[in-house]
Image (spheres, rainbow, N blue to C red):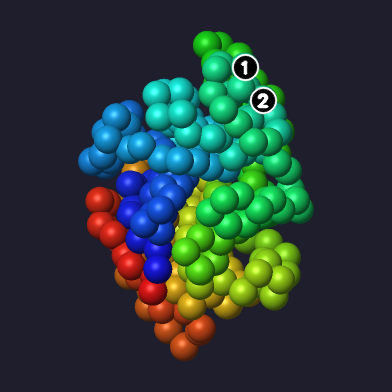
C-alpha cells in the first residue's frame, strides 16, 4: 500500500510507511499550495525538469532533509554542486533503490532553469516510473502526448498514472484522455492545472472522459491523500 498525497501543481508525496518520496515540490510562490517545505522530510526527492514550478523548493528541502535527489544527470549534478546528495540517471535507464525501482522516461517539454537573467541548460525533461510498496506509479512530468506511452504501459504495467491536464504548457484534457488509453493504468489522477490562469481546467471533464477505459479517475484536492491499495 502506498499513500499518495497531492501537494498541488505536479507535487506529490509517496509514502509506503517506510520510505517517503517527494516529487516536484513547488510550494513557495505557488498560490494554491498548503504545505510548507519545512514539514516535508523525504528520503528521496525526484525532479522531472529544471523549470521553477517543478524544482520549486527542491534545493532547500534536499539540503535540510538530507534527501537523495533522483534526477536527470544535469539537474543531479547542479544539486550536487550546491551541496545536496544526488543520484544522476537518464532517459531509458532504471535503478533499483532500497524502496524499489525507478525508470526515467521521455517527456516532450523544456528544462531550462532561470537563474538571474540567464537560463541554465538542464538537459532533457523526464517522466518517472516508480515502484514502491508493491505498486507501480508513472509521473509524466510536463509533457505533450506521445505515442510511446503505449510502450510505457506495456513494459511497466501501471497501478497509477499522474497526468498533466492543464494544456498551454503540457497535455490538456483531450490528450490526457488519450494518454490514459495508451498507458492502461488502474487509476489516473490529473495534475498541473488551476495553479495559473492559463492552465485553468475542470478535472471532472478528465474523469468523465476516461469512463469506459481501464482507469478509475480520481481527483485529489490539494493536501488530500489517496491510498493506493
Ligand atoms: Ni515545465
Ligand atoms: Mn510545469
Residue 178 in the figure: left or right of residue 225: right
**Residue at image coords 32%, 32%:** 37
Q: Which residue is depicted at the point 62% across and 74% down?
A: 157
Toward the top, the furthest residue is 116
226 relative to 118 in the view: left or right: left
Q: Is disc 1's CB within 8 Å of ligand 1?
A: no
Can residue 60 be seen by looking at this rendering? yes
Q: Position of residue 199 (x, y in %)?
A: 40, 48
The quarter holding residue 49 reads top right
Q: Which residue is mark 2?
A: 77
Q: Are marks 1 and 2 in contact (CB under 8 Å)?
A: yes
Q: Secondary structure at mark 1?
A: helix
Residue 217 point in image, percent of width and height: 39, 74
Q: Nearer the viewer, residue 147 or 184?
A: 184
**Residue at point 52%, 11% (across, down):** 116
Q: Position of residue 179 (x, y in %)?
A: 58, 69
Residue 110 can be seen in this image: no
The residue identified by callout 1 is: 81
Where does residue 3 sit, x and y in percent of width and height? 35, 61
Closest to the observer: 167 or 21?
21
Q: Is residue 119 above or below residue 186?
A: above
In depth, the one of 101 and 138 nearer the eye is 101
Give the SS element for disc 2. Answer: helix
Amino acid at each position: 500500500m502506498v499513500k499518495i498525497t497531492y501537494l498541488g501543481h505536479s507535487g506529490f508525496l509517496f509514502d509506503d510507511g517506510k520510505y517517503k518520496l517527494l516529487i516536484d515540490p513547488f510550494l513557495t510562490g505557488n498560490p494554491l499550495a498548503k504545505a510548507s517545505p519545512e514539514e516535508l522530510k523525504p528520503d528521496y526527492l525526484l525532479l522531472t525538469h529544471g523549470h521553477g514550478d517543478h524544482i520549486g523548493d527542491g534545493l532547500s528541502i534536499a539540503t535540510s532533509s538530507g534527501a537523495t535527489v533522483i534526477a536527470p544527470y544535469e539537474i543531479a549534478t547542479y544539486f550536487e554542486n550546491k551541496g545536496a546528495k544526488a543520484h544522476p540517471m537518464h532517459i531509458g535507464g532504471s535503478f533499483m533503490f532500497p524502496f524499489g525501482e525507478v525508470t526515467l522516461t521521455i517527456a516532450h517539454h523544456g528544462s531550462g532553469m532561470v537563474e538571474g537573467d540567464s537560463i541554465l541548460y538542464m538537459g532533457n525533461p523526464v517522466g518517472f516510473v516508480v515502484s514502491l510498496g508493491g505498486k507501480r506509479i508513472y509521473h509524466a512530468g510536463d509533457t505533450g502526448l506521445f505515442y510511446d506511452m503505449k510502450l510505457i504501459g506495456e513494459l511497466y504495467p501501471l497501478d497509477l498514472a499522474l497526468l498533466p491536464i492543464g494544456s498551454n504548457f503540457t497535455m490538456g484534457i483531450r490528450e490526457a484522455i488519450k494518454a490514459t488509453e495508451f498507458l492502461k493504468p488502474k487509476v489516473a489522477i490529473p495534475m498541473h492545472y488551476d495553479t495559473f490562469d492559463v492552465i485553468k481546467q475542470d478535472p471532472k471533464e478528465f474523469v468523465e472522459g476516461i469512463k469506459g477505459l481501464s482507469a478509475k479517475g480520481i481527483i485529489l484536492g490539494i493536501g488530500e491523500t489517496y491510498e493506493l491499495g
